[in-house]
Amino acid sequence: MIPAARPMIGAEERAAVDRVMATGMLAQGPEVAAFETEFSAVVGDRSCVAVNSGTSALLLGLLAAGIGPGDEVIVPSFTFAATANAVVLAGAEPVFVDIEPAHLCIDPDAVLAAITPRTAAVMPVHLYGHPAAMDRLAAIADRHGLAVIEDAAQAHLATWAGRPVGTFGQVAAFSFYPTKNMTSGEGGMVVCADEDTARRVRLLRNQGMERRYHNEVVGYNVRMTDLHAAIGRVQLRRLAGWTATRQRNAGHLSAALAEVPGVGVPAVADRAEHVWHQYTIRVSDRDTVADGLAAAGVGSGVYYPTPVHELPSYGLSIDLPETRRACAEVLSLPVHPALSEGDLAHIGAAVAKVMGS
Ligand SMILES: *Cc1c(COP(=O)(O)O)cnc(C)c1O
């Protein structure tokens, strides 16, 4: 079976963990500090604060941007629930809007239509590794005085108009969950536009303390450990190579699938550099196609079958037609860097066969 995702963990990651174990200092320390400095180099030298998950990164980013009770935050509904959950955990209200069908990211016109006097922020998600339309979104946010909080959990190294994602918002959040484009085991990074915001995130990460037992605010313990940071540092060094491989793999798949009737291949916007966290096709009879692929030894995944606003945790009954259609049609094929050329040819042939061509 060709798996839908596969974390790439090698001898270097194991050696890095062993090195930290040997020091006996396991909690947040010099490895975390080095990881933050090194990650900052891929996000335009912005201040970075490492935390224990992408969800924590979103939550602390929102809180540090001053988002809280009484505020509305405009979010897409076609995303992982963590995007909206972070807004609720910050005490604010997510306002769900529709996506652009071509790239499946938040629709700037829908954002514009959803702005109220209570809107404090817009939270674009760079879904599947494809950047949201950041020039239009930034212009809208600017004109209406909104903070931009980027959910870049799936989009390490993606760019829009040549500029890295994570450098458009007041804050941005990355995730290092095992299936993301790079991992630290679990982990996240808050990328901050200014040092005041970064300092607030650092306080919230560690019980409100910068100096020990001098707690300035009420904070969390969402620190990253040095064990996780050591893994993340190795992975970060390999990320550019893996990203190039993902891009090449996506090119092979699109070439193989372009002429297959009934398959919508993923489009890339002119100004976007896509990093292919997922390679996601659209098909009308999605579950049958997934079953046929499984029978042919090809794993696949559905991200996401249900609009976030319709999950039991939200239970809202608004209609977002493009979101509803995407939820019914999307199917993600393996695109990860562990695939061989033979795997890619097999995936292409299996999709063609299941589609009856
Ligand atoms: C993975 C993910 C998150 C959350 O990251 P965790 O590290 O799992 O907490 C948030 N938003 C999106 C879009 C994600 O894919």
Image (cartoon, rainbow, N blue to C red):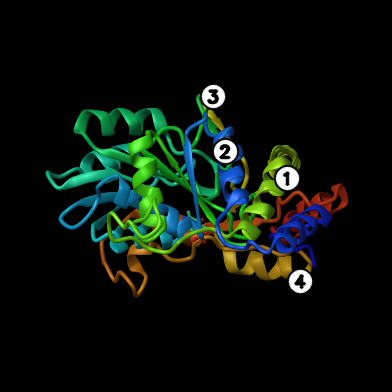
Q: Nearer the viewer, mark 1 or mark 2?
A: 2
Residue 239: give x, y in percent of width and height. Answer: 69, 42
C-alpha span from label 3 to label 2: 22 Å
In terms of secondary structure, where does tag 4 sit? Answer: helix
- Relative side of 16 to 118, left or right: right
Q: Amino acid at mark 1?
A: Leu
Residue at (37, 43) in percent of width and height: 199
Residue that numbered label 1 is attached to? 253
Q: Amino acid at mark 4?
A: Ala
Q: Nearer the viewer, mark 3 or mark 2?
A: 2
Q: Label 2: how many residues lie within 10 Å, few (<14), some (14-19) or many (20+)?
A: some
Residue that numbered label 3 is attached to? 162
Indicate the quadrant containing the N terminus: top left, top right, bottom left or bottom right.
Answer: bottom right
Residue 144 in which image quadrant: top left
The residue lying toward the viewer, choosing from 150 and 171, is: 171
Residue at (58, 32) in percent of width and height: 41
C-alpha span from label 4 to label 2: 46 Å
The residue lying toward the viewer, choosing from 346 and 179, is: 179
Tell me, yes or no, whether the two marked residues, 1 and 3, touch with CB atoms within 8 Å.
no
Q: Label 3: how many residues lie within 10 Å, few (<14), some (14-19) or many (20+)?
A: few
- Relative side of 126 to 244, left or right: left
Q: Is residue 263 visible?
A: no
The residue lying toward the viewer, choosing from 293 and 182, is: 182
Residue that numbered label 2 is attached to? 37
Residue at (33, 73) in percent of width and height: 313
